[in-house]
Every structure is written in structure tokens, then in C-alpha cells.
């Protein structure tokens, strides 16, 4: 057996797809290289992998071990597919006498001359080898075993093939494949993505550890891109990002990494505010690591930027006008792309002039050339804490390398350790724990991307504070649940445990009545406090014993008690993460002994959650409001409060002026133009506008002359209720989505939404040629409202004179208060079948006359045949609307 050939073949089997295309494994070449051997599919393990994938987990690595192929999942740990090492299982490839054998069976295939590199592939479950003619030839032998292809960037595909050639495939997703969309920050098209290039002049002397580029190489760095990814819990930091244009051309050399927005930062994309690292809003910053090109390669890349990207040269102005630049999208491993609205700019890198200690606002220092006296800056550090040296924000990416230097005696005295490559240092020792040591000088030697060598000196002083591990979990408190202004407590036993053997030192140093409390917006509490815990009518914080009321001493300290006034927010906002800092001070009250910082978010129910519709009035989510008031002055008022079981009485209510409700003659009409509100609260009434106006306030539409319907009658009107604050408190929402609630309402007449019809059957039968006419009585015809409640269209109220059968009749002859008038006409002006229609009013019996029943009297023409025709019954309701209903009438010969 040619072992080398066996190794090559098995490697090929594991590294090619079913179509024979070799797959680059990028970051995980080493992890799945040499996955050789005979593999027995572990059915339970395969099922387990599939279940994890279905549950949204993803693989961060693949490794071959003695136990099998190990898949490492982000959330679920490791899962193993078992290797079968038995000699009589799986498939063995051999090269004997110049011919390929599989499991001892000759294939008749003579491989290419370079046998060690002869590739193999599986096609339709059968092995094929590259023969001496350079063509793939089938062995006819089914594939058995396991193949793994892919990478962390693109995901892995695990294929299990049994001895009969039947294959099972499990696709294991990558981090990037879980990203469904990418949204760029809304200033991306104006700020662009700016690539800085620096020609590196190699210094004659440099003591740093990073390998230096060749002289006149070009070092590239870039600006950053703020993005939001969906879903918000997608592992965005584990994907690579590239820039791709609409022609599907991806810029070479540029690969971006994602970093979650820090707790100190906040960006706005599409109206969403937040911090990805703390609140899961999916916000990340993309940045490019420095990369180096030779002089010639740099020219080619610059040409690519000029020709393919039409990158804007920003050197002259420093600000780019990106018009006519090619628009690029951010591309996460070809799994998801942003919109194509990112232009590219280029500029010559600036000089590196300043550095700082990360997260230490007061540490910014100007660099000086090595030939002059370096700039000095005093910083105060905490023993045991690691600090990082970095460029200032405006000069990000301009430092190529740096290294620390300090006196050997200071290094040993203070236990200073540092890492030049990561730019970090730590002070481990405090030579005198009772008094602050005098400190030492720490020199920062820098090398810029241009090859400039500069330095600065930090005079390092030690803080007298006792470093307390951050052991308190973030707190979210609902101010709606405040009782007697009590909000929450912090258990001081947690701090005591964290201090450990430093507790005694703390207790002997601290003076509790000097303790300070404040709330900050930044995690490092370097900003101006939003509020301090001293006001009785706002935020009040105190140290107490276990009963939460007795003032604490060092010996009985148990709680930090936080009280919050439900009405007075003391400058704080809802749904915004703050940082409560409790600072313990020494007996003099000037020096800090230690502090604890706790993330705190106050929340409250949204405006929408404070509204509850009464379900009986709602149809498909819309209030169906029917007129009910018959008082002349207010009968067309629709009281909003009538339709809600609860509401935010402090919300400002307005009709929507944005969404189109209906259109007429190319003019758009909105809710605000179709109706008005009597007042901007939930106590107000909605009133349809008699003269509806379009979105610009003009093009008035009057009510329909026949029906009396306003243009907004029966339309779905949108009402918005907004409150910047929670209910009647001083607590302001920080997110727009919690400030607003909207609902829809239709305004209608109960009579207008009903009908008029015969009481029995589909037609009313009358006699032809009756000289007295035929009386249609209330037993023959009826009106019904929207809910099928009947009312009489025939006069049914005692009157002394008959109502006139006209639109302007003033005789109130109908008992139902919702009916103002009824008049009846024949259908069609040329209708000769009906000669006349009159109304007969109902009259009570008197001494001189018998009682008279109300009726609709119809006189029909003499006809030789039965004839169907119709009358139109017009009912005007109390709210001024007229419904005109066609009622069938059949004229009988006999």
C-alpha cells in the first residue's frame, strides 16, 4: 500500500464537495486538515447536531481527535461524531501495481502520473478518481464514511454515506449565516468609508517587537462604520465583513471586524437608540486592521480604488463630496448585505500626535520627537487593574507599534508587567498600603504608520482606592410599581465578599457618613452626574442596617437603599441605562477608598399598554362608533372615553395627518382633514368635518347633497395618543416607540347603516286602478337599523294633519326619535305604472271621526297584466343622513 497516496486520497475525499469543487477552509484549514480514516456514522450524534442547528446554534470550530470529529458549538459546547478504527469497516484505498484498489477490489483505474496528488471525488454516492488521461473515472463503488467541508466563515457541511451509498447531509451554519440583514448608520452616505494610506519610512533604530514593513511600503488604515444587524442576537463579532458593489465586485485587501458598541457609546440608526453590548440592540462598529502592501502592490490597489470604486480624494479638503462615487454595501461573508449607499474616500494618513490610556479621560498626552524632551502627564492607576495605551479617537489606526520602558528598580518595586504587542500594562504592588507611594515614570515609545518615532512619559501615581470587583448585576426597575417611594436595595454583603481579605483595611479606613452617591450616563462615570442621591423630592439613597431604616455603621452595614419619587424623576429618563456609583471615602472625606458601580435602568409601562379598548365596540381592530346622542347641540359628538376600559388621561390626542384615508380628484385626504377633536385629551369628542380638507388644508369637500354624508363618514380614521412621560409623572420615555399609541375609529349612523324592506317576501302587492289608492301599512313594510332593530317608515305617531310626501316635510309623524322624516317616490321619472304616492298620518279617534291608521298610499295605473316596479323609500335620520332604499312593488290585475 502506498501510504502517501492513501493520505492524499482521503484528504481529497474529505475536502471536496459532491461536484468535485475544492473548498477553501480559510480560518479552519488546520482544524479539518487530515481528517482521514474510516468513519462510522453515529446516528444519535447526527440527530443531536441537527437539533442544535434547528435551535439556532452555530459552529465555531471543527477538530479531529482520537475520539472522532469534534464540532464546537457557540452555545452548546462540543459534539463528537465517532471514528471507527476497526480494520473491517469503512473503506481502504490502495495503489498496487499501478492500479487503484478500494477495499482490496481492483478498480481498473490507473491514476495520473503524480499519484500523490491524484484527487478523488464522490459523484451520486460513487467514488471517482482522476485517471492517467486526466479524466475522472467512476469506480462503481459506493462511498462510505463522513466528509466535512466548509469553514467558520461559510459554515460546514457534514455528509455521512453508508455502505450502500445512501448519504445524509447536515448543514452546520456559521456565525455570518445567522445574520439576516445589515443596516448602516444613517450618515453612512455622507461620511463614507475613508481609507488612510501612509508611506512607511523605516527608522534606523527601533526596539519594538512588531515586525517592521519594508522601507517605502504603504500602510493602510481606515475610518469605522456603524451598523445594526438583525437579528439582534446574531454573533456579529465572529463574522468577517467586506465591501461589495452592485456589480458584485468586492474590494481587495479590505476585511472588517465587528466590535459591539461600548457601554459609553450610543448611535442612532432608523430611530433606534441603544448600546449593543448591554441592551442587545444589535449595534456594532466595523473597523479594518492595518494592512501593508509593497510599493507596487499599493499602486495596483490605488488603481482599483480609482477605477472600480471611483473613490473620492479627500486630501485637499479633508471632507469628501461623494457624488458619482460607486456605492458599496457591507457584505457579511456573502450571507447578508446592507443597502448600497456607502461611498469610499482616500486620504494621506495624518501624523500620530497624541496617545491616551483607554477609558481614562484625563490621560490624553502629546507625543514629542525623541530628540526633544518628551511630554509628561500624571495618571492615577489602581493596583491590579490592566490599562491599555491607544491613539486618540481622531487618530485611530495611525500607531503602527509601541513599547514601554521604565527603570528596572521601578519595575520590581511596583510589580509592573506589560505587553508591548497588546499595549497593556499592570501595576501589581503597592509598596506601602497605608500611604500612596511616590510613583514612577513610564515611557511610551511610539512608531507611526509613517515610520515616525515619538515618545511620551506618564508619571504613574497609585490610587489609594481599594479595587472592588464588579459583582453587582444590572438592575431594571419599573417605576409603576413604586410603593412608598421604595425602589430597590443593594446588598452590601456582596461587596464584602468581593473585598475578601481587604475588608478589614476597608473598615478601618472608611467613614460611612462621607459616602457619596451619584448616577452617571457613562460606564466609567467620567461624565457629569445626571443626579446625586441627596434630594428628598427626587432620588434619595442611604446606607442602612438590616432593617433598612436604621442608619448603618461599619459593623452593621447591610444595604444601600434607593428611594425614587414616582412623580419627580430628578432628571432621569426611562429605558436608558445609567450607572449608580456609590463612593466610599476616608475619614477625612476627601480621598476615595473604593466604589461600586451598578448598571441601573428605570422603566415604566408604555403609553400603548395603558390603553384598553372595550371589546364590544371593536370590529377587526377598529372602533365602530354609531351615533347615540339626540341632543341637538351635541348629537354628532363621539366621546372617545366611551370606547375604552382604561386609558392614559394625560396623553395628548390628535387625528393622524400623515396616512392617506381616501383620495378625490388627485387630492389626498387624511384623518386630520376628515374630522376634528373638540379637545386634545381622551375626554374630547371626535366630530366629522362638514367641509373635509386635503393634506394641504384646501380643496374642501362638502357633504353629499343627497345622503348628507360627510366625506369622512364611515372611513377608518386614525387617532394618535402621545405622552412624553409615563402617565402624570415626571418620568420621560427615552424611546419614541413607548411614547405613542394609535387606534382607528369609524363614525356611522345606525339608521344609515340599516335598510328598508317588505315585511314578508321580496315584494309588496298592490291593486291596480283603485280610485282610493292602495294603503301600504306598517304590517307590509319596515325599516331596520344596523342591528336589524325594526322601526316604522309608515307614519305611526298621532298627528292632526298628514305629512307632506316631500324632502322638506315638517310634520313629525314618526314615533321613533331617530327618524326625522320619510318621503316616498316612484322609481324612475318615466314610471307610468304608479300615478301618485301620498302619506297618510296616523290620527286618534275623536268624537267626530274614527281613528285613522298611518299608511303609504299608492295609486296604480289600470293594467291588463301583473307588473313589477319599485318605490324609493327615503328615510332621513335624526343626525341629518338620508338613506334611500328601493322597495319592490308588484301591481296586480285582480
Image (tube, grey):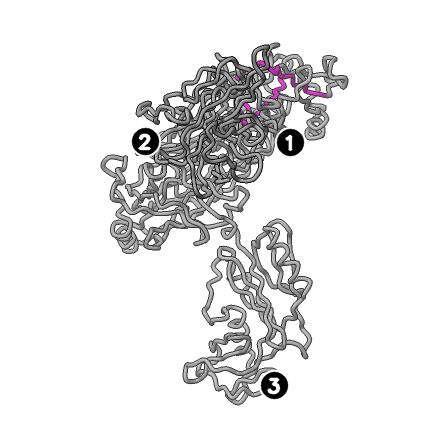
The reply, left or right, for residue 403 in relation to residue 509 is left
Residue 682, x across and y down, in percent: 53, 18
The residues bearing labels 2 and 3 have C-alpha atoms spaced at a distance of: 84 Å
**Depth check: 112 or 662 in front?**
662
For marks 2 and 3, give the one nearer the viewer. 2
Kindly identify which residue carries mark 2.
667
The reply, left or right, for residue 510 in relation to residue 692 is right
First in sequence: mark 1 or mark 2?
1
Q: Which residue appears at 63% of the width and 58% of the height?
A: 49
Kindly identify which residue carries mark 3.
104
Name the disc covering residue 473, or none: 1
For marks 1 and 2, give the one nearer the viewer. 2
Say which quarter of the image contains residue 147. Answer: bottom right
Residue 563, x across and y down, in percent: 65, 16
Q: Which residue appears at 54% of the width and 35% of the height?
A: 758
**Depth check: 513 or 781 in front?**
781
Q: Which residues are magenta?
A: 559-585
Q: Is residue 814 above or below residue 228?
A: above
Could you say whether the residue bearing mark 3 is in a helix, strand or loop?
loop
The residues bearing labels 1 and 2 have C-alpha atoms spaced at a distance of: 57 Å
The answer to whether any part of residue 724 appears in the image is no
Residue 503, x across and y down, in percent: 71, 25
**Depth check: 80 or 663 in front?**
663
Q: Main structural element of the magenta stretch: helix, strand or loop?
A: strand
First in sequence: mark 2 or mark 3?
3
For the N terminus, the quadrant is bottom right
Residue 420 magenta-highlighted: no
Amino acid at each position: 500500500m502506498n501510504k502517501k497516496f492513501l493520505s492524499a486520497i482521503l484528504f481529497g475525499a474529505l475536502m471536496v464537495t459532491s461536484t468535485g469543487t475544492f473548498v477553501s477552509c480559510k480560518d479552519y484549514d488546520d482544524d479539518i486538515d487530515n481528517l482521514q480514516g474510516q468513519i462510522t456514522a453515529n446516528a444519535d450524534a447526527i440527530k443531536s447536531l441537527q437539533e442544535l442547528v434547528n435551535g439556532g446554534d452555530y459552529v465555531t470550530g471543527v477538530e479531529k481527535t482520537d475520539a472522532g470529529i469534534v464540532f464546537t458549538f457557540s452555545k452548546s459546547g462540543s459534539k463528537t461524531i465517532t471514528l471507527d478504527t476497526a480494520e473491517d469497516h469503512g473503506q481502504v484505498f490502495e495503489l498496487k501495481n499501478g492500479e487503484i484498489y478500494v477495499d482490496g477490489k481492483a478498480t481498473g483505474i490507473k491514476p495520473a502520473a503524480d499519484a500523490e496528488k491524484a484527487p478523488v471525488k464522490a459523484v451520486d454516492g460513487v467514488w471517482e478518481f482522476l485517471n492517467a488521461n486526466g479524466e475522472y473515472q467512476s469506480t462503481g463503488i459506493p462511498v462510505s464514511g463522513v466528509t466535512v467541508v466548509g469553514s467558520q466563515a461559510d459554515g460546514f457541511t457534514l455528509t455521512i454515506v453508508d455502505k450502500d451509498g445512501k448519504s445524509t447531509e447536515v448543514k452546520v451554519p456559521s456565525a455570518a449565516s445567522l445574520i439576516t440583514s445589515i443596516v448602516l448608520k444613517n450618515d453612512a452616505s455622507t461620511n463614507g468609508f475613508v481609507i488612510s494610506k501612509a508611506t512607511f519610512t523605516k527608522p534606523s533604530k527601533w526596539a519594538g517587537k512588531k515586525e517592521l514593513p519594508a522601507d517605502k511600503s504603504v500602510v493602510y488604515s481606515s475610518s469605522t462604520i456603524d451598523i445594526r444587524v438583525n437579528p439582534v442576537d446574531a454573533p456579529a463579532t465572529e463574522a468577517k465583513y467586506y465591501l461589495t458593489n452592485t456589480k458584485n465586485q468586492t474590494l481587495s485587501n479590505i476585511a472588517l471586524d465587528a466590535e459591539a458598541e461600548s457601554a459609553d457609546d450610543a448611535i442612532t440608526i432608523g430611530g433606534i437608540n441603544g448600546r449593543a453590548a448591554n441592551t442587545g440592540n444589535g449595534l456594532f462598529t466595523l473597523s479594518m486592521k492595518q494592512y501593508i502592501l509593497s510599493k507596487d502592490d499599493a499602486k495596483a490597489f490605488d488603481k482599483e480604488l480609482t477605477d472600480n470604486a471611483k473613490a473620492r480624494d479627500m486630501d485637499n479638503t479633508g471632507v469628501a463630496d461623494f457624488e458619482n462615487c460607486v456605492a458599496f454595501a457591507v457584505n457579511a461573508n456573502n450571507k447578508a448585505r446592507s443597502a448600497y449607499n456607502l461611498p469610499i474616500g482616500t486620504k494621506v494618513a495624518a501624523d500620530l500626535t497624541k496617545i491616551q490610556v483607554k477609558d481614562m479621560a484625563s490621560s490624553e498626552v502629546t507625543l514629542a520627537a525623541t530628540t526633544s524632551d518628551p511630554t509628561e502627564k500624571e495618571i492615577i492607576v489602581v493596583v491590579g487593574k490592566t490599562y491599555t495605551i491607544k491613539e486618540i479617537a481622531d487618530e485611530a489606526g495611525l500607531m503602527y507599534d509601541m513599547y514601554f520602558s521604565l527603570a528596572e528598580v521601578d519595575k520590581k518595586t511596583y510589580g509592573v508587567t506589560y505587553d508591548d504587542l497588546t499595549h497593556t500594562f499592570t501595576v501589581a504592588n503597592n509598596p506601602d498600603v497605608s500611604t500612596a507611594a511616590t510613583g514612577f515614570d513610564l515611557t511610551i515609545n511610539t512608531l507611526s504608520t509613517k515610520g515616525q518615532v515619538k515618545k511620551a512619559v506618564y508619571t504613574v501615581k497609585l490610587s489609594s482606592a481599594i479595587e472592588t470587583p464588579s459583582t453587582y448585576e444590572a438592575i431594571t426597575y419599573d417605576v409603576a410599581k413604586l410603593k412608598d417611594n421604595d425602589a430597590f436595595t443593594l446588598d452590601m454583603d456582596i461587596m464584602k465578599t468581593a473585598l475578601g481579605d481587604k475588608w478589614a483595611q476597608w473598615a478601618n479606613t472608611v467613614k460611612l457618613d462621607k459616602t457619596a452617591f451619584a448616577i452617571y450616563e457613562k460606564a466609567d462615570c467620567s461624565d457629569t452626574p445626571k443626579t446625586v442621591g441627596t434630594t428628598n423630592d427626587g432620588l434619595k439613597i442611604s446606607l442602612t442596617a438590616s432593617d433598612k431604616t436604621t442608619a448603618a455603621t461599619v459593623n452593621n452595614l447591610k444595604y444601600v437603599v434607593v428611594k425614587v419619587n414616582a412623580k419627580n424623576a430628578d432628571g432621569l429618563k426611562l429605558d436608558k441605562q445609567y450607572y449608580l456609583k456609590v463612593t466610599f471615602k476616608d475619614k477625612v472625606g476627601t480621598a476615595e477608598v473604593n466604589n461600586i458601580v451598578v448598571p441601573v435602568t428605570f422603566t415604566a409601562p408604555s403609553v400603548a399598554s395603558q390603553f384598553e379598548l372595550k371589546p364590544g365596540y371593536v370590529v377587526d381592530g377598529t372602533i365602530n362608533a354609531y351615533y347615540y346622542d339626540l341632543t341637538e347641540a351635541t348629537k354628532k359628538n363621539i366621546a372617545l372615553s366611551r370606547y375604552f376600559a382604561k386609558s392614559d388621561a394625560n396623553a395628548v390626542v390628535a387625528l393622524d395627518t400623515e396616512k392617506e384615508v381616501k383620495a378625490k380628484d388627485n387630492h389626498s385626504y387624511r384623518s386630520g382633514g376628515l374630522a376634528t377633536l373638540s379637545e386634545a385629551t381622551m375626554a374630547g369628542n371626535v366630530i366629522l368635518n362638514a367641509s373635509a380638507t386635503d393634506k394641504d388644508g384646501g380643496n374642501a369637500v362638502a357633504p353629499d347633497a343627497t345622503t348628507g354624508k360627510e366625506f369622512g363618514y364611515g372611513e377608518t380614521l386614525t387617532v394618535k395618543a402621545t405622552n412624553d412621560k409615563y402617565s402624570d409623572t415626571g418620568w420621560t420615555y427615552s424611546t419614541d416607540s413607548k411614547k405613542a399609541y394609535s387606534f382607528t375609529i369609524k363614525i356611522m349612523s345606525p339608521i344609515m347603516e340599516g335598510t328598508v324592506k317588505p315585511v314578508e317576501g321580496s315584494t309588496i302587492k298592490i291593486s291596480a286602478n283603485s280610485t282610493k289608492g292602495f294603503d301600504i301599512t306598517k304590517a307590509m313594510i319596515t325599516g331596520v337599523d344596523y342591528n336589524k332593530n325594526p322601526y316604522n317608515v309608515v307614519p305611526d305617531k298621532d298627528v292632526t294633519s298628514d305629512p307632506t310626501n316631500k324632502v322638506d316635510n315638517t310634520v313629525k309623524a314618526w314615533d321613533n326619535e331617530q327618524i326625522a322624516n320619510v318621503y316616498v317616490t316612484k322609481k324612475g321619472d318615466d314610471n307610468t305604472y304608479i300615478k301618485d304616492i301620498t302619506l297618510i298620518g296616523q290620527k286618534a279617534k275623536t268624537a267626530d271621526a274614527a281613528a285613522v291608521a298611518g299608511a303609504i298610499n299608492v295609486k296604480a295605473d289600470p293594467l291588463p297584466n301583473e307588473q313589477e316596479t319599485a318605490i324609493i323609500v327615503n328615510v332621513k335620520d335624526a343626525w341629518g343622513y338620508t338613506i334611500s332604499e328601493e322597495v319592490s312593488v308588484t301591481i296586480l290585475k285582480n
